[in-house]
């Protein structure tokens, strides 16, 4: 008789709930930091070198320039980072669970690259969180650039992988998978469009110092964050039937005549 593996779950949480908690942390942190800065640090958080009137704090100012905003942001990002890394690795297994034919090795390589960009996105986010623009502007700026590039590349590769998955599975591609792919495409298009607009507004503010332009830039920053979180939130659909769990695994060796002879 073959050996058997006995599993005992020590802790289990459905992935939809797990995913909502993970996505909820940075969403709550963003909302709290912006609202608190607007209410209690308005003048300081909206001030720029142009000295023109603005009405919303930028994300960098809201999360890193004041307390308790800085503490709330760092705690929430820290708490959500490890689960995000776990999900990044889980996605590699998810994507490579299907065979796409003669291009399968390339497909697996792209799946690994997508997970790598996801990990890089989380790592750069943690770094720019703990090194604010006031602590070291150059490092903070570099980490933000890495964050945005890796995030956009991850989104593009994820959509490509889901398209290949759809082509491979054909009619077996589920309604939930179709919904996830459709949302990913919409959120990616929205995210990159708003990001490019925010880049334009940022440079326009610096070049012309017009009142209100930095406010529009700040609003675009909020939308970039929200659409990024929502894109990662599609994992709730992809892993809807899964659970996050700590599992105790015990190998049970079946008793055979040879085992009994050795034991004696």
Image (cartoon, rainbow, N blue to C red):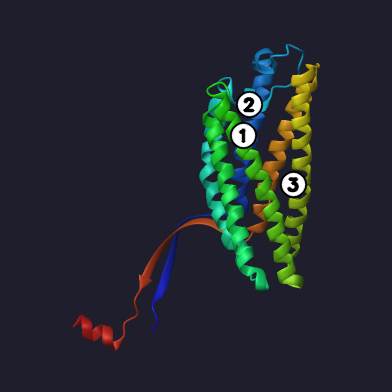
Q: Residue 5 lies in what quarter of the image?
A: bottom left
The answer to the question of whether label 2 and label 1 lie on touching residues, with beta carbons closer than 8 A, is yes
Q: Which of disc 3 and disc 2 is earlier in sequence?
A: 2
Can you give x and y, in whole percent of width and height, for residue 68 in the image?
56, 22
Residue behind mark 2:
60
Can you give x and y, in whole percent of width and height, for residue 56 in the image?
73, 21
How many numbered circles are shown? Answer: 3
Q: Which of disc 1 and disc 2 is earlier in sequence?
A: 2
Q: Residue furthest front?
A: 207
Residue behind mark 1:
144
Can you give x and y, in whole percent of width and height, for residue 173 in the image?
73, 67
Cα distance in 3D space between marks 1 and 3: 18 Å
- Residue 128 position (above or below residue 208): below
Q: Residue at x 77, y 36 (%)?
A: 196
Helix, strand or loop at label 2? It is: helix
Between 42 and 107, the residue placed more toward the observer is: 107
Q: Residue 137 lies in what quarter of the image?
A: top right
Q: Residue at x 63, y 46 (%)?
A: 20
Instruction: Give the left or right position of residue 15, taking residue 168 as reference.
Output: left
Q: Residue at x 54, y 36 (%)?
A: 126
Specify few, some or many for label 2: CA neighbours under 10 Å numbering under 14, 14-19, or 20 or more. many
Between 200 and 193, the residue placed more toward the observer is: 200
Q: Residue at x 63, y 36 (%)?
A: 145
Helix, strand or loop at label 3? It is: helix
Q: Residue furthest left?
A: 264
Residue behind mark 3:
188
Can you give x and y, in whole percent of width and height, for residue 47 in the image?
69, 15
Foreground mark, 1 or 3, reads 1
Foreground mark, 2 or 1, reads 1
- Residue 212 position (above or below residue 4): above
Q: Is residue 242 visible?
A: no
């Amino acid at each position: 008789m073959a050996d058997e593996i006995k599993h005992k779950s020590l802790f289990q949480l459905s992935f939809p709930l797990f995913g909502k908690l993970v996505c909820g942390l940075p969403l709550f942190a963003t909302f709290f930091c912006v609202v608190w800065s607007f209410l209690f640090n308005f003048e300081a958080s909206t001030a720029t070198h142009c000295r023109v009137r603005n009405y919303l704090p930028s994300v960098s100012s809201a999360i890193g320039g004041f307390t308790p905003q800085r503490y709330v942001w760092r705690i929430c990002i820290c708490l959500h980072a490890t689960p995000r890394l776990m999900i990044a690795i889980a996605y590699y297994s998810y994507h490579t669970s299907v065979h796409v034919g003669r291009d399968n090795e390339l497909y697996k390589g792209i799946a690994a690259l997508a997970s790598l960009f996801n990990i890089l996105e989380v790592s750069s986010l943690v770094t720019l969180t703990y090194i604010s623009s006031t602590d070291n502007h150059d490092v903070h700026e570099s980490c933000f650039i890495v964050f945005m590039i890796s995030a956009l590349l991850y989104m593009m590769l994820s959509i490509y992988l889901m398209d290949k998955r759809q082509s491979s599975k054909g009619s077996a591609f589920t309604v939930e998978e179709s919904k996830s792919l459709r949302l990913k495409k919409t959120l990616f298009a929205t995210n990159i469009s708003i990001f490019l607009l925010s880049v334009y507004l940022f440079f326009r503010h610096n070049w012309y110092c017009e009142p209100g332009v930095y406010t529009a830039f700040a609003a675009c920053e909020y939308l970039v964050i929200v659409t990024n979180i929502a894109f990662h939130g599609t994992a709730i659909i992809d892993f809807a039937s899964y659970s996050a769990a700590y599992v105790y695994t015990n190998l049970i060796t079946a008793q055979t005549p040879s085992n009994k002879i050795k034991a004696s």
